[in-house]
Amino acid sequence: MTNVEAFFERYDADEALRRRVAEAEAAYPGSLEIRESLVEAVLLPIAEELGLPFTVKDLRGYELKKKLKNAKPDVPIGEDEPEEEQASYWLLDRGWEINEDHYKLK
C-alpha cells in the first residue's frame, strides 16, 4: 500500500483528521482553484506529520487509478482494493487545470 492510499484510508476512517484537513483548507490563503498549490500547502504537510509523506505526482497517479476504476467498474485494477461508492478527488476535475491538448495546432 502506498502512502497516498494509507493516508486516504485513514482519512476515510478518522473524523478528526477530516476536520483537521477541512480547517486547514478553510484557512488556506491562496486560490482554491489552483489545486496543486492547495494540496502542497494543506494536504501534504498533514500527511507528512502522520508519517505518510507523498507528492502531488503521487496523488495524481492515485486519483487517475481511482478514476479509471470508477469509469470502468467491471475492469479490476487490483484484487486487494476495496470497492468505492463515490469518488472524490483533490486534483482531478476540480479547480483550474491547463488542458495542453486544447492548445495544440492541428
Image (cartoon, rainbow, N blue to C red):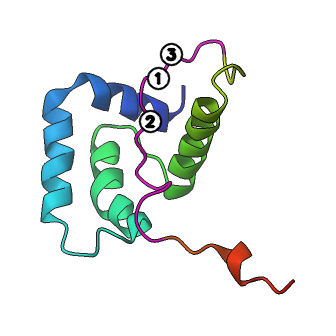
Residue 3 position within the rendered picture, expressed as x and y whole percent measured from the top left: 47, 35
10 with respect to 27 (left or right): right
Q: Nearer the viewer, mark 1 or mark 3?
A: 1
Disc 2 element = loop
Residue placed at 34% from the left, 46% from the top? 48
Neighbor class of circle 1 (other Cα within 10 Å; few <14, some 14-19, many 20+) is few
Q: Disc 3 and disc 2: Cα gap in Å? A: 12 Å
Q: Residue at x 25, y 75 (%)?
A: 30
User: Can you give x and y, in whole percent of width and height, for residue 89 in the image?
Assistant: 43, 46
Task: Locate residue 102 relative to residue 63 in the image: left or right.
Answer: right
Q: Residue 76 falls in which quadrant of the image?
A: top right
For the stretch drawn in magenta, what is the main secondary structure?
loop
| Disc 1 to disc 2: CB gap under 8 Å | yes
Viewed as shown, does residue 25 lie left or right of 85?
left
Task: State the CA–CA distance, disc 1 to disc 2.
Answer: 7 Å
Q: Quadrant of the N terminus?
A: top right
In the rendered image, residue 89 lying in the magenta stretch gets the answer yes
Quarter that holds the C terminus: bottom right
Q: Amino acid at mark 2?
A: Ala
Residue designated by label 3: 82
**Do callouts 1 and 3 mark residues in contact (Cβ within 8 Å)?**
yes
Q: Is 74 drawn above or below residue 70 in the view shown?
A: above
Q: Which amino acid type is shown beneath numbered disc 1?
A: Glu
| Residue 20 location, quadrant | top left
Tell me the distance, in whole angstroms, between the alpha carbons under discs 1 and 3: 6 Å
Q: Which residues are magenta?
A: 79-96
Residue located beneath label 2 in the image: 87
Q: Position of residue 80 (x, y in %)?
A: 59, 13
Determine the residue positioned at 56% across, 18% down.
81
Residue 6 rendering spot, x and y as whole percentages: 43, 29
